[in-house]
Amino acid sequence: MNTRNLILFALVGVLYIATGMFQSWNLALNILNIGLLSAIMALGVNMQWGFAGLFNTGIMGFAALGGLAVVLVSAPPEPGGWAMGGWGILTGLAFGAAVIAFATWLYRRLGKGPVRTLVLFAVLGGGYFAYRAILDPATAAVESFNPAVAGNIGGLGLPSLLAWPLGGVMAAIAAWAIGKIALGLRSDYLAIATLGIAEIIIVVMKSEDWLARGVKNMIGLPRPWPVPYEVDLQQTPAFLEWAANWGFDPAAASSILVKLVYALLFGTILLGVIWLSEKALNSPWGRMMRSIRDNEVAAEAMGKDVTRRHLQVFVIGSAVIGFAGAMMTSMDGQLTPGTYNPLRFTFLIWVMVIVGGSGNNWGAVLGGLLIGWLWLIVESLGPGVMQMLTLGLGEGPLKAHLIESAPHMRLLTLGVILLLVLRFSPRGLIPEK
Amino acid sequence: MDILNALVTFLNFVVVPATAYGAQLALGALGATLVYGILRFSNFAQGDTMAFGTMITILMTWWLQSLGVSFGPLPTALLALPVGIAVTALFLLMTDRVVYRFYRAQRAAPTILVIVSLGVMFVMNGLTRIIIGAEEQNFADGARFLITAGEFKTWSGLDEGLAIRASQAITVVTAIIVVAWLFWFLNKTRTGKSMRAFSDNEDLALLSGINPDHVVRITWIIVAALATIAGVLYGLDKSFKPFTYFQLLLPIFAAAVVGGLGNPLGAIAGGFVVAYSEVLVTYAWKKVLGYLLPADLAPDSLVQLLSTDYKLAVSFIILIIVLLFMPTGLFKGKSG
C-alpha cells in the first residue's frame, strides 16, 4: 500500500462520510454493507480474471446459490412439508445423480460408435423418465402442504453463519461442473457457458417451489450470530440508557448500531479474504497462475497443467462469490429469486473489478466500494437530479418520461465508465504490481 | 382421421411456432457468428443491438401510424424497418470507430474485446431503456392471421385447427429472403468474398490487398441489418421488452456454437436446432398422444418433458452437449 492508494481509499471514505452527513447515516451504512459484500465478490472475480484471465459471466448464479444455502441451513424446519415428500425428493435427486454417473461410466467404458450412442440415449432417456417419476409426486406433495405460508421442505434451523461456508461449497460444486465442461476450450466458451448456468440457477430457484418457495420468496430468515434485532435493542435497558446519555433517538440508534455490527462482521471477513488472496498471489502458486495467464503456451511447456490450474482457480473464485452471496441473503433476511438480475449481480461486479484494477486485490476492494457507492447513490439521488435537470421543461409526457427513466441512466453511466477505463486506464485505479 | 388430427395439432403447436422462432434465432445467430468470424470475439451486445434496432423501428412505426400511413395487411413496422436498420448501422459504425477500432489496432486478446462488448451492451441497454422504457411494447398491426383455426377446420373438416399468424408467415418469408441475399453476397460479390477471406485467414487476406477497414465496416452494417430484422420479427411475433432481448443472448450463442462459431450456414442450422428442441421439449404432448394412442393407453398427465419455465435450460443443455462432444459445432467453426 503506497501513499497514492491510501489517498484513493481515503477519497472513497470521504464519499461515504459525505453521504452520511448530507443524506443519512443509515443510507451510508447500508451502502457500505452492500459495498463490502460486493468487494468480496469482486475479490472472487479478481482471482479468476486477475490471477488467471478467466472470464466468468455467471456471478449472479453463484451468488444466488449462496443465498439458497442460507435458506437450506438457517430457515426454520418445516416438518410437515418434509414429511410429505422430503425423502422422496432426496431419493429422486440421488437417482438423477446416479444416472448421470452411470452414463459417464458407460461413456468411458464403451468404445466409440453407434452402440455407445444408442446405449447412452436409452440410459439417459429412461433415467430421465424414472427420475421424474420419483421426483414429481414428492415435489407435488411437498408443494401442496400449506402452500400459502410454506409448501417447501424447509431448512435445518441452524445458525446463519454455518450457511456461509455451505454457500461457498455449493457455488464451488456448480463451478466445478461448468469448468470441467467449458475450460480447456476456447476462452469465449467459458463466458457463454457461465452466462447460461447463472440463468438456469435463477430459473430453478424461481420455479422449484418445494426448494425455497420459488417466487413466493423466503422471508424472515434469521440474522447471523452477533447481529442483534432492532426490536430487542429497543427493549434492552442498557442500550436505552446509552442512547439517552448520548442524546440519540433509540429507534434510529438501534438501526444504525445493527448496520455497524454488520459492517464490522463483513469488514472482518473481507480483510480475511484479502489476506488469504494476497498470500496466495505472492506464493509460488500465485506466480504460476500469473505466468499461465500471461503465456499459456510457455507455462504448458514448463510442465504446468493449464486446464487443471484454471479449473482450480475458477472453483476457488466461485466459492468466494457463493460465500458473499450467502452473506448478502443473510443480511437481507430474505431470498427473493426475482431480484437476481444479471446487470446488477454479474456485470456490475465486473465493472468493479475492471475499474478498481484487475489483478490487484486492493484494487478490487476499492472498485467494489466505489462502484457500489455510485450505483446505490444514483438510485437514491437519480430521480431528484432528473427533477432538477428537467425543471425548465413544462409539465408533460416528456418530462414524466425523463424522470421515470432516471434509474436506467445508471446502466448508461456504468457502460461509459467501463469503456473509458478500459480505453484510457486499462490497468485500473490500483494497477497490478 | 385421428392421425391427421394428431398431425395438425403437432403442426399447429410445434412446427409453426418453432419454425418462426427458429428463423428469428437464425438471423440473430448469423449476426453473432459474423462478428465472431470477422472481428474475432463473442459479441455480448448482440441481444441489446437487436433491442436497439427494434426500438428505433417501433418509434418510426408509431410516427408513421400517427401520420395515418399503413402497409395494408402487412405490419407498418416493415415500412419502418429500413430506418431502424440505418440508425442501428450508424450506431454500430460509430461504436466501432470510438470503441472497437482501438483494440483491433492493438490486436487485443479476444477476452478483452468481450469485456469491451459488455460495456457497449450496458450503453445500448441503458439507451434503449431511457428512450422507450423497460416495459413491454406491442407494435404489431395489420392482418393478424394468414389462416385462422376456424377457417382451417371448416376447410378440412378436422376437429383440430391449424392457425398461422401473419407474423409467423412474415418471419419465415423475410428470413428466407435475407438469408438468400446474404449467401449470394458472401459467395458472389467481391466484398463478400473478401469478407470470407478475411475470416479464414486475416494475415493472408491483408497480404492480398484486402482493405480491413472496409471489411469491418460492411460487417457491422450487415450485423445491424440482421440484428434489427431479427429483433423486429421477434417483436412482431411475441412482443418487445428490453430484458427479454437481453436474455435471447443465450439461445443465440447456443445456436451459433451448435452450428460452429464463425460459420454462417451453421448459425442457421443452429437456430432451428435450438428452436425446435426448445418447443419439442417444453410442449405438452398429451393431445397428440391422445389422438395417436388407443383410448385406454391415452396419458393422463401433460406429457411435458420440461415445464415452459425451463425454456432457457434447453438452449443451455444443447450448448453443454455440443461443448462436451463436438466443441467445433456441427459445421466445423473456428476452434483454435
Image (cartoon, rainbow, N blue to C red):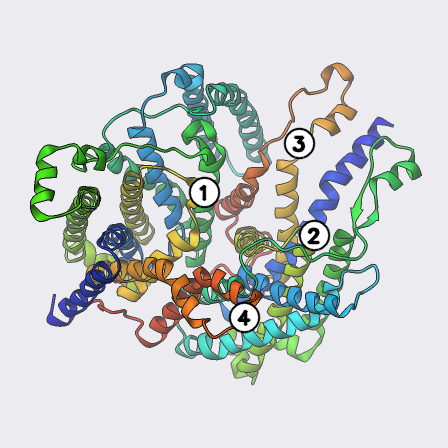
Q: Tell which subunit mark 2 falls on.
A: B
Q: CA distance from mark 3 to mark 1?
A: 26 Å
**Which callout, 3 or 4, points to the residue nearer the camera?**
3
Which label is found at residue B237? 2
Q: Where is mark 3, residue-wise?
A: B284
Q: Is residue B301 left or right of residue A316?
A: right
User: In this rendering, do the residues under marks 2 and 4 share a single chain?
Assistant: yes
**Mark 3–mark 1 contact, CB under 8 Å?**
no
Question: Could you confirm whether marks 4 and 1 are on the same chain?
Answer: no
Tag nearer the camera, 3 or 1: 1
Number of the label disc, if any, that sits on residue A101: none
Q: Considering only order in the chain, which callout, 2 or 3, is on the residue closer to the N terminus?
A: 2
How far apart are the alpha carbons under marks 4 and 1? 38 Å
Q: Three-letter amino acid code at disc 3?
A: Ala
State the count of labels. 4
Q: Quadrant of residue A78?
A: top left
